[in-house]
Image (cartoon, rainbow, N blue to C red):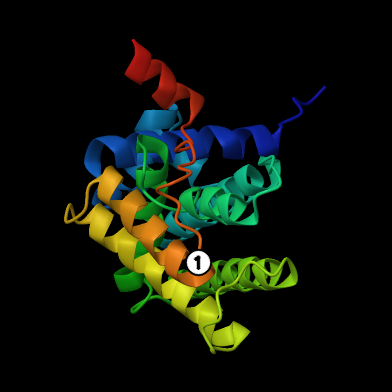
Amino acid sequence: MPKIVDHDQRRRELAAAVWQVIARDGVDGISIRSVAAASGWSSGALRHYFSTRAELLAFACEEVIEQVTERIKALRHGDDPVQAVRAILLETMPVDETRRTEDSIAFAFLALGLGDPELARVQRRHFTDMYELCRQLVQGLAERNALAQTGWDAETLARRMHAVVDGLTVHGLAGHLTTEEIVAQLDAYLADLTGVDLTEQPGELPMRRRDREVRSG
């Protein structure tokens, strides 16, 4: 009887191998050969799933989008809408090792997408999904009367939120801002947006379980 292959499991194994290579060598280290070595597969076996490096990179970025989306869905929010928005936005920003790796992959597509249609498609999905998230967050704040009287329409506020989050992320990836500075600037922006001073009611900075264990060890 032929062996039944769990393709979803194999894709999860490949995703783990991609993270391993990026953590060690950065996005430039991604290749069919490097990911095959990290996964324990042969290059030939890997090419059954991805025939080119571009396909492998597109897979890596789409895995990031899916992972972040699932984490956001799993968040449990209290009654404070501003703290809820803060927690959601921090899931997309480089404030721990896991999210730094994810953002490194996603923002590598700013350059990679210029010369490859497949990578450009993933780049557009990344930016479109992030804008849609910001639009939903602004709409949610408006519905709960949690926005300051800025005089700006919802679309402008959503575009601005998107720009602030992406800007802080890029500055963090480039080493211009520390994790603490990223969080402080996000809190300052949310204070302007909502009129709520988050320094008076600071929320816990969400950490992956692995990062919490490393910090306490």
Q: Residue at x 34, y 78 (%)?
A: 115
Q: Name which quarter of the figure residue 24 lies in.
A: top left
Query: Does residue 53 appear in the picture of this structure?
Result: no
Q: Name which quarter of the figure residue 76 lies in.
A: top right
Residue 38 image point, x, y percent: 37, 30
The quadrant of the rendering that contains the C terminus is top left
Residue 102 image point, x, y percent: 42, 48
In the image, 125 versus 33, the foreground residue is 125
Amino acid at dot 1: Gly
In the image, 36 versus 157, the foreground residue is 157
Relative placement, left or right, of 158 versus 189 is right
Q: Which residue is drawn at 26% across and 54% down?
A: 172
- Looking at this rendering, what residue extends furthest in the top direction? 217
Q: Which residue is drawn at 60% across and 34% down?
A: 10
Query: Does residue 182 appear in the picture of this structure?
Result: yes
- Looking at this rendering, what residue extends furthest in the right direction? 1
Q: How many labels does the image show?
A: 1
Dot 1, how many residues are within 10 Å of its Cα: few (below 14), some (14-19), or many (20+)? some
Relative placement, left or right, of 155 versus 5 is left
Residue 169 image point, x, y percent: 34, 59
Q: Is residue 90 above or below residue 132?
A: above
- Looking at this rendering, what residue extends furthest in the front direction? 200
Q: Which residue is drawn at 68% across and 38% down?
A: 7
Element assignment for label 1: loop
Residue 143 image point, x, y percent: 74, 71
The residue that label 1 is drawn on is 195
Q: In this view, does 107 lie above or below 160?
A: above
The quadrant of the rendering that contains the N terminus is top right
In the image, 37 versus 104, the foreground residue is 104
